[in-house]
Image: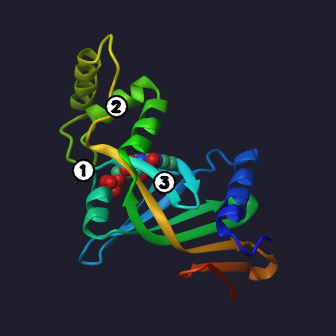
Amino acid sequence: MNISDPISLFKQWLDEASQHQAIADATAMCLATAQKDGQPSSRMVLLKGVDARGFCFYTNMESAKAKALQANPRAALCFYWAPMGRQVRIEGLVEQVTPTEADAYFESRPRESRIGAWASKQSQPLVSRTHLLEQVLAQTLQFEGGEVPRPDFWSGWRVVPSMIEFWQEGHFRLHDRDVYRRTDVAWEHSKLYP
Ligand SMILES: Cc1cc2nc3c(=O)[nH]c(=O)nc-3n(C[C@H](O)[C@H](O)[C@H](O)COP(=O)(O)O)c2cc1C
């Protein structure tokens, strides 16, 4: 295990999970947020980029998660790759990705998904599924024959890690836990009892 750079180690584990036949989507991760009053909330999102700066996902900026992150810019992520007996936990502050980064990812999505982004008022009450489909149709007609630009209300967040923990399942519950905490100059590594 490379104990000096947890981002490289994460990329290695993600690559291995992505190549594993029994793992449908290695980029699926649980995102936990907390409102200002401390009430936590979690849901799955997809990892769409990772580098030394952090871990990115994309969403509607008026969704419940985005409102929580605006009020309290801290998040936790959790990956679980069951067939490999591996879990990775990440904690840190969040920042919004740049408009250029958001544009680049939005443009890479299928046209139907881009139209869907315009049609969905994510996390708001919906009268009926029919209403949603009507909105999709309306947006499809609106953009017919043209490009589908990124809505202002759709962008991404980067979780800037201050802590990353790698958990590897062991026999008889003697799991391996490697924790990395970011200091001003480097990552500090330690091990934890399982
Ligand atoms: C595997 C999986 C991946 C998902 N990926 C995303 C994603 O990348 N972005 C997103 O906004 N919602 C994603 N969702 C939907 C979220 O889990 C959630 O329902 C939605 O974002 C609304 O959450 P909120 O009301 O807490 O903001 C995904 C759901 C699943 C099950």
Residue type marked 3: Cys
Residue type marked 1: Glu
Please identify, in this view, whether the residue under mark 3 or under mark 2 is nearer the observer.
3
Residue at the spot 27% in from the left edge and 49% down from the top edge? 123
Figure label count:
3
Residue 17 percent coordinates (x, y) = 71, 53
Label 3 to label 2: alpha-carbon separation: 20 Å
**Residue 52 higher or lower than 155, as above or below:** below
Q: Are marks 3 and 2 in contact (CB under 8 Å)?
A: no
The residue beneath circle 2 is: 116
The residue beneath circle 3 is: 56
In the depicted view, which residue is nearer to us: 172 or 67?
A: 67
Say whether residue 28 is left or right of residue 64.
right
**Residue 168 higher or lower than 24, as above or below:** below
Residue at the spot 26% in from the left edge and 43% down from the top edge? 153
| Pointer 3 or 1: first along the chain | 3
Q: Quadrant of the C terminus?
A: bottom right
Residue 83 percent coordinates (x, y) = 73, 57
Label 2 to label 1: alpha-carbon separation: 15 Å
Residue type marked 2: Gly
The residue beneath circle 1 is: 62
Which quarter of the figure has residue 42?
A: bottom left
Residue at the spot 55% in from the left edge and 50% down from the top edge? 49
In the depicted view, which residue is nearer to us: 82 or 165?
A: 165
Q: Quadrant of the N terminus?
A: bottom right
Label 3 to label 1: alpha-carbon separation: 17 Å
Q: Is mark 2 within 8 Å of ligand 1?
A: no
- Crowding around mark 1 (Cα neighbors within 10 Å: few <14, some 14 to 19, many 20+) is some
